[in-house]
Image: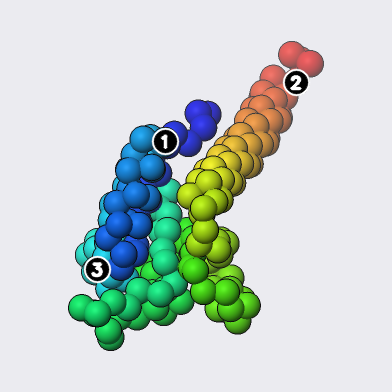
Amino acid sequence: MADLQEKNVYIYLVDDDDFYLKVFENKFKTSTGCITHTFNTGEDLVDFIGRKPLSKKLVHIVVMDYYLQSIENQDAKNGIEILKIVKDIDPEVEVILYSGIEDDSIVSKGIQLGAVTFVKKNENTFMRIHNSIKGIISKHNLEKKHTTSKLTKRILILLIVACIVALGVIYIFNPDMF
């Protein structure tokens, strides 16, 4: 079975800082084959993914800043609040949080609510997020192979049982064949 391809990975970038959002979008478009969508608010992301169920055949990864309030949107929910809503909508969505704020309680709460990781915003942010995305893709590939392996074993067991039953039926009706 083929590995998951980057074209089957959707990355949803969420940041209230337009410059940061554009830089990330450009870097993801030029360095990966993933499909990217950008959002200036967590609420816009929630509206987008809440419209219809996300395809289970694809991997959906949210890359989101923790601090999403801006002058225009002072009532915006933070990344932790949006994380909780996203996981309530679809627990399979992978979420990577990042922030310039260093607060262990925020990191802990994010991980507790299901974030894959929490990345400190600095000159290495994109590289660390990109590596996390590669890790997520690898995890999904392993899960896919494991599921395929379990299915193959079940089919093999069913075939063996069917052969034993068929031999038993043949023996009952034609014992001279053995």
Q: Residues within 10 Å of mark 2 (few under 14, many from 20)?
A: few
Residue 95, horizontal then vertical, whole percent: 47, 61
Q: Amino acid at mark 2?
A: Pro
Q: Earlier in the sequence, mark 3 or mark 2?
A: 3
Query: Element type at marker 1?
Result: helix
Instruction: Give the residue pinned by disc 2.
Output: 175
Q: Residue at x 75, y 20 (%)?
A: 175
Q: Amino acid at mark 1?
A: Ser
**Is 35 located above or below residue 178 in the figure?**
below
Instruction: Kindly identify which numbered label has been placed on residue 44.
Output: 3
Residue 110, horizontal then vertical, whole percent: 54, 73
Is the C-beta separation of discs 2 and 1 under 8 Å?
no
Residue 19, horizontal then vertical, whole percent: 30, 57
Residue 100, horizontal then vertical, whole percent: 49, 69
Is the C-beta separation of discs 3 and 1 under 8 Å?
no
Q: Earlier in the sequence, mark 2 or mark 1?
A: 1
Q: Residue furthest front?
A: 123
Distance from disc 2 to disc 1, alpha carbons, whole Å, reads: 67 Å
Q: Amino acid at mark 3?
A: Asp
Give residue 43's quadrant in the image. bottom left
**Is 42 located above or below residue 129 in the figure?**
below
Query: Element type at marker 3?
Result: helix
Horizontally, is 52 left or right of 61 in the view?
Answer: left
